[in-house]
Amino acid sequence: MLMAVVLMSVLSCGQNKRPILGETEFQKTINAEYKDASTSPLKDKDRKVFESLEFFKFDSTYVVTAQFKRVENAEWFNMKTTTDRVSKERVYGVLTFELKGETFSLNVYQGQELMTKEGFEDYLFLPFLDETNGLESYGGGRYLDMKIPDSNTVVIDFNSAIIHIVLIMSVFLARLYLVLII
């Protein structure tokens, strides 16, 4: 009974942030890509029941202009992922920006394997942590996809980061299980 009450409480937290069709053009586009068999990363059985990715309500505060500084000759390293897979990455650059009066710097990464895949030669990965990690979004952080910038300024729209609710629930249930058996 306790588990059902806690689970319902957690699930109800996300009701105000999940637009079924997406609010922004980006959200509509990525949802359409996930539904389309030719572009979806989902398995057929998952794609058939897919409705929408999770996003927070759009807030212009989280659209920032960052200064981009390229990191030359960065060494490749093995980046852990949420699965058993390890990704060979390097720091491609650093993005520095202000948000709510504070200055932040984030590394942006380039994957060795993706560099050789057609259509992904200019792909960059921007992982980040924020105050939503844990209950509102995946505890391990969220990320944005980027392209290699052609100037030293980059507009970052943190509203475009997907909320991985399945991972949140897995972590939450594992923690709840540990609490109940202790």
Image: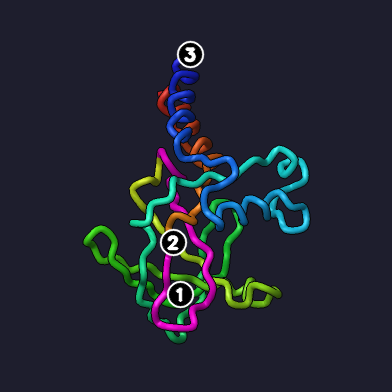
Camera-side mark, 1 or 2 = 2
- In x, y percent, where is residue 144? 49, 61
Q: Residues within 10 Å of mark 3 (few under 14, many from 20)?
A: few
Give whichever of discs 3 and 2 has the lower sequence position: 3
- Classify mark 1: helix, strand or loop: strand
Colour scheme employed for the rendering of this structure = rainbow
- In x, y percent, where is residue 86? 58, 62
Task: Relative to 123, say whether 11 is above or below.
Answer: above
Task: Relative to 171, say whether 75 is above or below.
Answer: below
Circle 1/circle 3 CB separation < 8 Å: no
User: Looking at numbered disc 1 in the image, what kind of residue is underneath it?
Assistant: Val
Please identify the quadrant where the C terminus is shown: top left
Q: CA distance from mark 1 to mark 2?
A: 20 Å
User: Looking at numbered disc 3 in the image, what kind of residue is underneath it?
Assistant: Met
- Residue at 38%, 52% (x, y): give it: 59
> Residue 91, labelled with which disc?
1
Give left or right: position of 69 versus 38. left
Residue 48 lies within the magenta run: no
- Classify mark 3: helix, strand or loop: loop
User: Looking at numbered disc 2 in the image, what kind of residue is underneath it?
Assistant: Asp
Write down the residue under mark 2. Answer: 157
Give whichever of discs 1 and 2 has the lower sequence position: 1
* Quadrant of res 156: bottom left
Residue at the farthest bottom position: 72
Write down the residue under mark 3. Answer: 1
Q: CA distance from mark 1 to mark 3?
A: 47 Å
Q: Which residues are magenta?
A: 135-156
